[in-house]
Amino acid sequence: MSSLKIDNISMRFDLPNGGAVQALKNVSLELNQGELLSVLGPSGCGKTTLLNIVAGFLAPTEGKIVLGGKTVKGPGADRGMVFQQGALFEWMSVRENVGFGPSMKGMPKAEKKQIVDHLLETVGLHDFKEKAVYELSGGMQQRVALARCLANDPEVILMDEPLGALDALTREKMQGLVLNLWKETGKTVILITHSVEEALLLGERLLVMAPRPGRIHREYRLPFAEMGVNSDLREVKKHPEFNLKREEILSMIWEMEEEIMGPSEVAGA
């Protein structure tokens, strides 16, 4: 079982004028294999910075990331990223996009085809495998991005607002797909979102982060992700505890925004 340890991470960005911004301060967390963590907080709390450090795109000022007992020194195949925009190769077909990672690894064609066909079937795109990416809707492109990430068989999937640009109906369908893929694959998932409702639905563990500097303000362990697997998410949202937690977290973030901006600015937003 490969655990992911975020060990006392701090991140400071030095500015050209001699000043500095403390984006994160003393963030520590441990995730066991197969856990699904959603991360929520007001703008400027360091959510994406933390995700980029876990991905290996940024080196922290202090602390370290340890995955499976090894310190993360940079990007690696053991961590896969799904961005808000799919970051797909638009000149390639759906099949070629999903098979890109296995091709780079030199995987035999027959094995690659089997993996790609299975993943496209799983995300509901098998009939679109020869289509060019630009011919697909936004929701379909995000399904391609998920399948491409899974084709590399990472230990950890990192998702940075992956559903933020989708319309409400497509977003709900994709939320259900994320839950089902999480349960089917047993992957560890960290998902960044600005939506309280989405964080509640998709996080069996949920972090609320506070800004200036970014730090863990509160952690929740929740039943809704398990409840939502292969279920109607609208029914999950009707659960009394779901509504209580939503109002509690909304109030918490609202108070943080007031501290940052002042009550009049928040009220007029």
Image: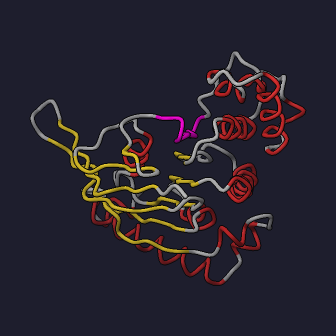
The image quadrant where one finds the N terminus is bottom right
Q: Is residue 128 magenta?
A: no
* Picture residue at 32% right of the left edge, 66% below the top: 258
54 vs 171, left or right, is left
12 vs 41, left or right, is left
* Picture residue at 35% right of the left edge, 70% below the top: 255
96 vs 48, left or right, is right
Using the image, determine if residue 257 lies above or below residue 10: below
Magenta stretch, overall SS: loop
The image quadrant where one finds the C terminus is bottom left
Looking at this rendering, what residue extends furthest in the top direction?
91
Looking at this rendering, what residue extends furthest in the left direction?
18
31 vs 216, left or right, is right
Using the image, determine if residue 249 lies above or below residue 158: below
* Picture residue at 74% right of the left edge, 22% below the top: 96
Using the image, determine if residue 258 lies above or below residue 109: below
- Asked where in the image residue 80 lies, by quadrant, the reply is top right
- Front in this rendered view, residue 100 or 260: 100
- Front in this rendered view, residue 265 or 260: 260
Residue 60 is situated, as x and y percent measured from the top left of the image, at: 28, 43
| Start-end of magenta stretch | 76-85
- Asked where in the image residue 239 lies, by quadrant, the reply is bottom right
Q: Is residue 79 magenta?
A: yes
- Front in this rendered view, residue 111 or 31: 111
Residue 69 is situated, as x and y percent measured from the top left of the image, at: 41, 51
